[in-house]
Image: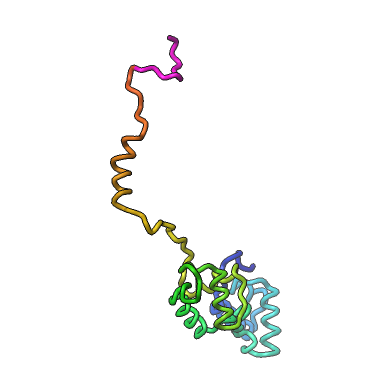
């Protein structure tokens, strides 16, 4: 049966289903019927029955966290976030822009853990930081002058449609 790609498993619900199957098996219900009632494959029920027999109900408990354990603890993440909030300039960079490469360097400096810059975004996402691009506006920018140019000068420069009655060079009418 499995899960579609990208869908997280509900480990509590899976454990509940195994425990329900264990109760049915203890009542003497056949594995095929148990499989139908809990909505799993017959082979899964067979595997659960073997675990139940060898390890008891403890063998059907949910496993610990799936996947590789995180390399940065919650305490480390808080320390990292305070380092990010100080700004990139505080660490000697010329701009305040945090790139994944810079964050990877910060993690290595602070914690001695190497992260590939391509994977740092996961740490940032866990901290609630998002990917943003700087606006890239000049410091000398004069907003009032720009507004004047857009409202007064640009309309004066824009091409205007030809007056009606004047034929265009793309006219299809026979002359």
Q: Residue at x 50, y 85 (%)?
A: 75
Q: Residue at x 53, y 67 (%)?
A: 99
Q: Residue at x 55, y 80 (%)?
A: 16
Q: Residue at x 67, y 90 (%)?
A: 55
x, y (%) of residue 157?
Answer: 35, 35
The question of residue 172 being in magenta is answered with yes
Disc tally is 0
Please say which color scheme the image uses: rainbow
- Magenta stretch: dominant SS? loop
Instruction: Judge from the rendering whether residue 173 lies leftward or rightward of residue 157; answer left or right.
Output: right
Tell which residue pokes out farthest to the top in this image: 175
x, y (%) of residue 71?
Answer: 59, 81
x, y (%) of residue 65?
Answer: 59, 81
The question of residue 159 being in magenta is answered with no
Q: Quadrant of the N terminus?
A: bottom right
On screen, residue 144 above or below 57: above
In the image, which residues are magenta?
A: 166-175
On screen, residue 131 above or below 109: above
Residue toward you, 24 or 112:
112
x, y (%) of residue 97?
Answer: 48, 67
Residue 105 visible at all: yes
Residue 15 visible at all: no
Q: Quadrant of the C terminus?
A: top left
On screen, residue 40 above or below 69: above
Residue toward you, 132 or 7:
132
Tell which residue pokes out farthest to the front in this image: 140
Where on the picture, by quarter, is residue 24? bottom right
Residue toward you, 131 or 89:
89
């Amino acid at each position: 049966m499995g899960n579609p790609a990208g869908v997280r498993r509900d480990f509590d619900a899976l454990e509940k289903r195994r425990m329900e199957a264990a109760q049915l098996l203890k009542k003497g219900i056949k594995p095929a019927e148990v499989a139908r009632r809990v909505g799993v494959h017959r082979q899964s029920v067979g595997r659960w029955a073997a675990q139940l027999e060898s390890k008891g109900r403890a063998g059907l408990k949910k496993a610990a966290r799936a996947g590789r354990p995180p390399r940065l603890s919650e305490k480390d993440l808080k320390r990292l976030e305070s380092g990010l909030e100080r700004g990139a300039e505080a660490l000697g960079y010329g701009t305040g822009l945090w790139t994944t490469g810079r964050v990877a360097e910060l993690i290595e400096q602070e914690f001695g853990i190497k992260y590939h810059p391509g994977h740092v975004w996961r740490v940032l996402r866990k901290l609630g930081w998002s990917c943003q691009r700087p606006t890239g506006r000049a410091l000398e920018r004069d907003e009032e002058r720009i507004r004047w140019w857009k409202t007064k000068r640009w309309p004066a420069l824009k091409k205007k449609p030809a007056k009606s009655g004047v034929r265009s060079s793309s006219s299809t009418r026979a002359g």
